[in-house]
Amino acid sequence: MKLTHHAFLWLLLAPPPAPPAEPGPVSEFEQVVADRLAERGVPGEMIWLQAEGRQFLGLYLGPPPGMPKQAVILLHGLGGHPDWPDVIQPLRARLPSLGWGTLSIQLPRLSPQASHADEMELPRRVWPRIHAAIAYLAAQGVEKVVLAGYGFGAALSARYAGVFGKDLAGFVAISLQTPAYLAPRIVFPESLEAIKVPVLDVYAAEDAGTVLQQAPERELWGRKNKERVFDRIVIAGARPDYHGQEAELARQVADWLSANAK
């Protein structure tokens, strides 16, 4: 699926964008996303982070007062944004009331004319953004950080967690998959073996075909590492967008984090 899909069209219906809250180099496509979200108004604080000399958007909701200093970094799927209505917005808005702050970040936005080589560069471009998000949370006094991704965001964050994630408190993959047209695939189920922190594999009972087909393989590779927890949760009655099951998804993730995040 290319980035010309219909989900981006709503962003083009608003007036021309205003300058960013903190002027600086931002890609054209990411700037459009940021300005539309600012016009809509979103819960939490819109912040600008820096990675590789560019600004990128984050939406931050801190841990509740009096609760442990812990937070979840959220990565949206391909072509999405930090307040994506499927999974990302419900999680980032609900988890704070369940004891976990959230920082949802904008992933690099490719143009509709992006080449295959550009797409294969995505992991390298995403990792500095995760680094910056972790640094921001540390500056806010957050002591326990979990990385979570949805769809392609789960695939990208799984690679990060396997390479850099030893200081994370946990990793949550929601409907982990990569686009079929990417060859070689950016992530394989065996990448889960490399992650050294507790891992949760979440998917919907009526999820996309590839997510369901790869579930046994994800579990096989996830359980090969006997030195840490690997669990999976299937959200009953849910489809890939989890509509109508958002509260259950947030509750299950929060419960697992409370029991397993190191």
Image: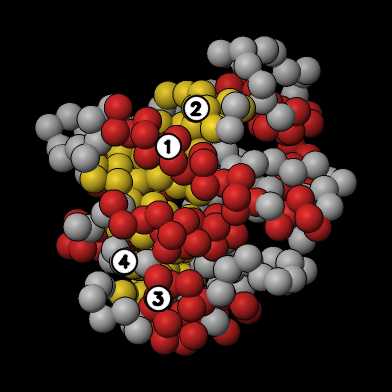
Residue name at image x 68 percent, y 32 percent: 30
How far apart are the two marked residues, 1 and 4, measured between alpha carbons?
20 Å
Looking at the picture, which amino acid does disc 2 mark? Leu
Looking at the picture, which amino acid does disc 4 mark? Lys
How far apart are the two marked residues, 3 and 4, measured between alpha carbons?
8 Å
SS at circle 1: helix
- On screen, residue 52 versus residue 197, left or right, reads right
Marks 3 & 1, CB-CB < 8 Å contact: no
Residue name at image x 45 percent, y 47 percent: 74
Q: Residues within 10 Å of mark 4 (few under 14, many from 20)?
A: many
> Which comes before the other along the chain, label 3 or label 1?
1
Residue 207 image position (x, y, % from top left): 56, 73
How far apart are the two marked residues, 1 and 2, measured between alpha carbons?
7 Å
Looking at the picture, which amino acid does disc 1 mark? Ala
Residue under pointer 2: 49
How far apart are the two marked residues, 3 and 1, measured between alpha carbons?
24 Å
- On screen, residue 243 versus residue 95, left or right, reads right
Marks 4 & 2, CB-CB < 8 Å contact: no
Q: Is residue 225 above or below residue 256?
A: below
Marks 1 & 2, CB-CB < 8 Å contact: yes
